[in-house]
Image (cartoon, coloured by chain):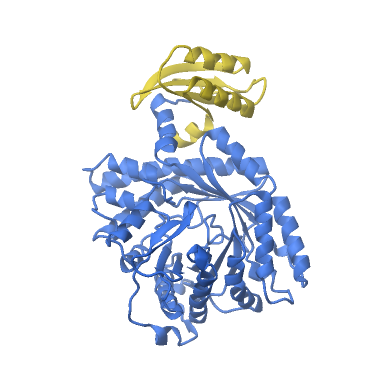
Chain colours: A blue, B yellow
Amino acid sequence: MLFNNQEILETIQMVKTENFDIRTITMGINLRDCAHPDIEQLATNIYDKVTTKAQDLVSTANKIERKFGIPIVNKRISVTPISIIADACQETDYTSIAQTLDKAAKEVGVDFIGGFSGLVHKGYTKGEKNLINSIPQALATTDKVCSSINVASTKAGINMDAVLEMGATIKEAAQLTAKQDGLGAAKLVVFCNVPEDNPFMAGAFHGTGEPETVINIGISGPGVVKNVVEQIPDADFNTLADTIKRTAFKITRVGELVGATASDMLDIPFGIVDLSLAPTPAIGDSVANILESMGLESCGTHGTTAALALLNDAVKKGGSMASSSVGGLSGAFIPVSEDQGMIKAAEIGSLNLEKLEAMTSVCSVGLDMIAVPGATSSETIAAIISDEMAIGMINKKTTAVRIIPAPNKEIGDKVEFGGLLGEAPIMKVSKFNSDKFVQRGGRIPAPIQALTN
Amino acid sequence: MHQQADNSEERAVVTVLGADKVGIVAKVTTALANHNANIVDISQTLLEDIFSMIMLIEISNLKTDFETLNKELTELEEEINVEIKLQHENIFKYMHRV
């Protein structure tokens, strides 16, 4: 067993000056045994199960934080998609279920609870229809609840009816939370090829292939990667990729250690480490800054997609060596409002929606935390979603859209959510309309890539 | 620090960061001794011009527990105005060894 001082100090420096932390320990909880035709009984079942299973989550995470000296920023819960649990209910308004989840989350002290969700890529059940109708009110009347809807997959194609409906749902969610700049829409994400074990919000839920309970880990380390990239300004691409790989290995190992330790202490199986580089609004903890450190004047300029492709691939290679249970989204995130460098790039006009869309074809996860004018029509939002879903469907990858049509805001304004959600300038959308396209109805067929058997 | 592998022992790393001044080593080692934490190795180095002292300690036979020792070191940190970190050795094993 050998440590040298340099290694010890390197670890300490990562935390101290480069914002390295574990973004989240997310406990997945199966709620399928909570189903009941009476919505009040269902709520009681959910509350009791969540507060029992997760009662020690926060205190355990705090202990692990102290044991290893690594901050664990968020503790979260993901549950079985509520559309499945509530399908048997006579009641059609599921808002009260979201409120129960909120109450349970507050009781156990977690930061977010995800799973007010449904998977409708091929069509709706009654429960999924009810759930989508309940989303705006559910998000407006809760603090911790996150919602996600999967509307497309490589195997099923794109459910364009759902895409159109989500355009309207997102607008309504923003409108009902107008006083908070449309915060409701920041807790709602639309997916293609959604992973069932993602620990990150707003898209976390406990998939049907998952065990009774599970511990998933999300790491965060853009600041650390940025720092090592900055130290080799003249290195060629091979050296650059190698350096990022090595760093990704180290930070993913910490995720693996924290996951294994939490699993052991809570006696719950360890699911996955999501090796995504998740930025925070803190200065320097930015994926955009990493790309800029590679030699781009500002994120969004020509070369950005190539730089991001290199980064994302190197992170995966290093991370996959560090853990045998990599899962979730596992790629670099490019949420605009949550990344100081992205915010700045959008403000000075070097980053626009079109470039972001191109970037999402080479990384996870999609158009994330983008604020657009409040007057943007629900059809235009649906069309933006459909583009992103097409990228995911054709490339057999996860893509997502989390877009905030900020009520009463226009180009030049900005939205402020605070905390990890950050702030964002309003970005421009195309002035040409796509109404007739998104209103056609039906499903964009699954692509030829779906025929793999 | 060159150590032989020994799986029966649980160890932790104590790092002290701050301006060098009289009595730091004495105070930290006294606190460790009070908890029956044996110091296996000790060394000093500079991190970006900041004084740092790194100790490898055995924590298998602590009189109290890791949490209590950590709390006491945090109190000491405020008292002598330096940064003291207590971290289980596994964090370094995981990060720096394949």
Residue A51 drawn above or below residue A225:
below
| Image position of B47 with respect to A431: above or below | above
Residue furthest left as drawn: A234
Q: Is residue A242 left or right of residue A176?
A: left
Residue sitting at 46 percent across and 50 percent down? A275
Picture coordinates of residue A217, whole percent (x, y): 54, 49
Q: Is residue A264 visible?
A: no
As displayed, is residue A349 above or below residue A339? below
Pick the front one: B64 or A261: B64
Q: Residue at x 49, y 36 (%)?
A: B94
Spot occupied by residue A216 in the image (x, y as percentages of width and height)? 57, 51
Question: How many numbered markers are drawn?
Answer: 0
On the image, the x and y values in percent for residue A108 come to 67, 50
Q: Is residue A134 left or right of residue A201?
A: right
Classify A179 as above or below A248.
Answer: below
Residue found 74% across the figure and 67% down from its top: A35
State left or right for residue A106 relative to residue A16.
right
Residue situated in front as seen by the camera: B97 or A176: A176
Residue toward you, A154 or A440 = A440
Front residue of this view, candidates A202 and A326: A202
Which residue appears at 52% of the width and 29% of the height?
A: B89
Q: Position of residue B26 (x, y in %)?
A: 51, 12
Residue A182 seen anywhere in this rendered image of the structure:
yes
Quadrant in which residue A266 is drawn: top right
